[in-house]
Image (tube, rainbow, N blue to C red):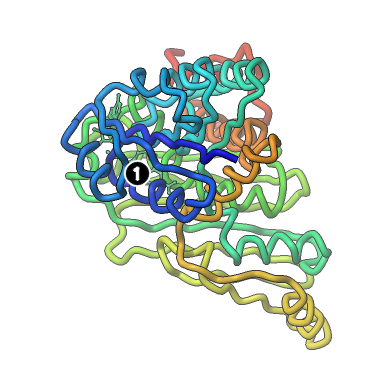
Amino acid sequence: MEKLGVAIIGSGGMSAGHADSFLQLDQHIKLMAFTDIDLSRAKARAREFGAPIAVTDYQQLLKRSDIQIISIVSPPFHHFQTIIDSLDAGKHVLCEKPVVMNLAELDQVETAVHKTGLGFGGAFQWRFGASVRQAKALHEAGMFGDIMYASNNLYWLRTREYFDVDWRNSYQKAGGGIVFNLACHGLDALMFILGDIEHVSAELDALNYQMEIEDTGVVILRFKNKALGHVAATVNAQQQRSRVEIIGTKLEAISNDDPYCVAYEPWQFRSIDPGHQKAVNEFLKTQNFQYEPASHRRLIAEFVEAIMAQREPAVGVSEIRRSLQVLTAIYKANRLKRTIDLPIQKDDPFFTDLNPEL
Ligand SMILES: NC(=O)c1ccc[n+]([C@@H]2O[C@H](COP(=O)([O-])OP(=O)(O)OC[C@H]3O[C@@H](n4cnc5c(N)ncnc54)[C@H](O)[C@@H]3O)[C@@H](O)[C@H]2O)c1
């Protein structure tokens, strides 16, 4: 089988993670091109990762028959049109989170995916971390008992320069603030483990930086299985850390505090019942979970496997919708200062805009 050619759209910070992950698959993949509106960035990445092409306009690449996969790592406002153009041109698409700006755009993406039959996936990589997978397996085996509480605290540090980057400080270009763009990972991991959410309430604010999107937020979650939970996020921490905790009637999970590797480094699974603790330890030994550094490698390997097997990638449209539904409800809850039930319906103004005129 011929190797699949890959083009990476957007040659900023995250593009290196995509390139590195595709290069691990060199039996099946050939890294062909980088694009960026800043040609010097595209050229630098192309040199760094040995890709023969660097251009400013991705449309040039869509005409090429030696490129089959478009990997989108440009700013959020640029994702939707690139996805649609790429699918229309017959390319499979992997797109960075938060994927698209609203649920209406995701509906259009879904229509294009169904029409073309091409592969489409989003980049929620925390769920590929060994510890998140362990927690999910334990939950599915009933080892937690009933889960009563689940949370992610994400205390990161982002300086003024971070938000000075043109696309990072507005609803129009970033889609939302740090809950939409950063805490979406912890939220995705909690939903991956526990399942869907019934309703949310939220308070979001820009407490440190003067901008319309939030730098700090707290979200109360009620899961469909009745568990309560929260996501608390700020980018104003002095010492960066992140933690996931899950409390069940028979077992609790406490992650490490590593700000970026929380899903990947070992978690503690604790029970006060020694017999149950032993059963949990035995259960974990029977599973083949491998700790490895945080990266997009497993996500991208699974995406390529899915393309080759002509099946939907693990983070396909329906998984992206689950996350975007909850994120939309969070922004609505904050604006209206009340609890919001899921799902958000098509005639809701938030369905087409996370910051609508009301
Ligand atoms: N999954 C993760 O953990 C993770 C981590 C960081 C960023 N991201 C996502 O990756 C995407 C990019 O983030 P980043 O941190 O690399 O940003 P960045 O600002 O470092 O890079 C974005 C690049 O896109 C380029 N660009 C802008 N408009 C473009 C266009 N029209 N065509 C081509 N290139 C264009 C910019 O010049 C810049 O080089 C965002 O969607 C972000 O949310 C995901």
Front in this rendered view, residue 290 or 30: 30
Count neighbours of disc 1 (C-alpha within 10 A) and say few if under 14, some if 14 to 19, many if 20 or more: many
Rendering coords of residue 156 (x, y %)? 35, 56
Figure quadrant of residue 92: top right
Question: The disc labelled 1 sits on which kind of residue?
Answer: Ser
**Position of 60 relative to 227 (above/below):** above
Residue displayed at 67% across by 30% down = 342
Q: How many marks?
A: 1
- Secondary structure of residue under mark 1: helix
Residue displayed at 16% across by 36% down = 40
Q: Which residue is mark 1?
A: 15
**Position of 103 relative to 125 (above/below):** above
Question: In screen coordinates, is 19 left or right of 277?
Answer: left
Front in this rendered view, residue 129 or 331: 129
Rendering coords of residue 66 (x, y %)? 45, 29
Front in this rendered view, residue 347 or 309: 309
Quadrant occupied by the N terminus? top right
**Position of 217 relative to 266 (above/below):** above
| Quadrant in which ligand 1 is drawn | top left
Residue displayed at 29% across by 31% down = 35
Figure quadrant of residue 287: bottom right
Residue farthest to the bottom? 274
Rendering coords of residue 69 (x, y %)? 49, 33
Rendering coords of residue 146 (x, y %)? 80, 61
Residue displayed at 30% across by 47% down = 50
Mark 1 close to ligand 1, CB under 8 Å: yes
Question: In screen coordinates, is 25 left or right of 208?
Answer: right
**Position of 146 relative to 8 (above/below):** below
Question: In screen coordinates, is 272 left or right of 92?
Answer: right
